[in-house]
Image (tube, rainbow, N blue to C red):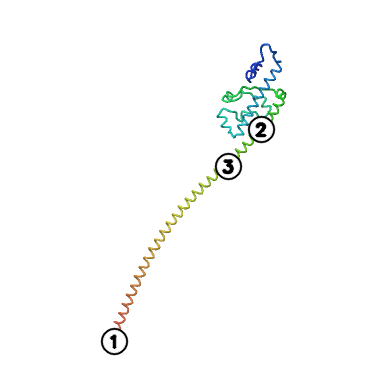
Amino acid sequence: MATRSSDELTRSVGLPRAPQGRRPAPSIAAHNAEVARRNIAAKLDLLADYLSRAAGGLQAADASSHGALTLEDLPRSPRQFNGWESVALRQEVRSRVIPFFKNSNATLKKHEDLHVLVIERIRAIGQSNAQASAKEQSRAALLRKIALANRLRQIAEKELIRARRAVSTERAKTEALEAVVASTAAKAKEQVKELHGEIAALKRENTRLSALAKRTTLKAV
C-alpha cells in the first residue's frame, strides 16, 4: 500500500487542515502526531462499538448482515491492532466506517492513554468471545440433549404402538380361542346330554327285557 501524505491522512480521519492565513501553522511533527492519535482513536472507537453491541447480545451473524464489524474483523492483540487498516475489511463494512490506517508500535506507545485503552479493549473482546463461546457450547449441548430426548420419545412412542398392536393381536387370538373353547364346551355338553338320554333309554329297554324274560320263564314252568 502506498504511503499517504499527512494531508491525505488529515482528510481521512476528519482532522481540519493546518490553519492558513496569518496564524502560524503548527509544526509538522505536532500535526502528524495529532493525525496519528486520531487514527488510533478511530480504531479504538470501533472496538468500543463492537463491545457495546456484544454486551447487548447482538449475534455475530446479525451484525454481519447489518454491515457491522464482527469478531473476525477485529484485532486480537496490540500487534494486530497496529497493523489493522480499513482496506482489509469487507466492502459492506468498509463503506460504513471512517478510513483508518496502520500505525507503528512506537507511535502507539507515545500515546500512553490510548495504549492502555487498546490493551483493555482487546482483553475485553477476548473475554466477550470466551463468554459467547461458552454460551454457544452450552446452547449446543442443550440442543443435543433436546434432540436425544426427542429421539428417545419417538422410539418409546413407536414401541408403545407396537406393544399395543401386539396386545390387540393377542387379545384377538385369545378371544378367538375362547370362542372355540366355548363352542366346543357347548357341543360337548350337548353330546353328554344326548349320551345320558341314550343311557336312560338303554336302561329302560334293559328293564323291559328283563321283565319280559321273567314272565316267559314263569309261563314255561
Image x and y of residue 178, in percent = 41, 61
Which numbered circle lies on residue 142? Answer: 3
Mark 1 or 2: the one toward you: 2
How far apart are labels 3 and 1 at the CA level? 111 Å
Residue closest to the eye, 29 or 212: 29
Alpha carbons under labels 1 and 2: distance apart: 137 Å
Q: Is 160 on the left or on the right of 83, as rendered? A: left
For the residues bearing labels 1 and 2, Cβ distance under 8 angstroms: no
Q: Residues within 10 Å of mark 1 (few under 14, many from 20)?
A: few
Q: How many marks?
A: 3
Say which residue appears at 66% left-offset and 33% top-offset: 124
Q: Residue at (29%, 86%) from the top-left corner?
A: 218
Q: Earlier in the sequence, mark 3 or mark 1?
A: 3
Give the structural element (helix, strand or loop) at label 2: helix
Decide which of 21, 180 is in the foreground and name it: 21
Marks 3/1 in contact by CB < 8 Å: the verdict is: no
**Mark 2 vs 3: CB contact within 8 A:** no
| Residue 218 numbered mark, or none | 1
Label 3 element class: helix
Q: Residues within 10 Å of mark 2 (few under 14, many from 20)?
A: some
Measuring from the top left, give residue 129's x and y in whole percent: 63, 34
Q: Secondary structure at mark 1?
A: helix
- Dot 1 or dot 2: first in sequence order is 2
Residue 124's label in the rendered image is 2
Location of the C terminus (image quadrant):
bottom left
Q: CA distance from mark 2 to mark 3?
A: 27 Å
Task: Please tell me which residue is depicted at 58% across the width and 42% down the height of the picture.
Answer: 142
Q: Residues within 10 Å of mark 3 (few under 14, many from 20)?
A: few
Q: Is residue 218 above or below residue 43?
A: below
Amino acid at circle 3: Leu
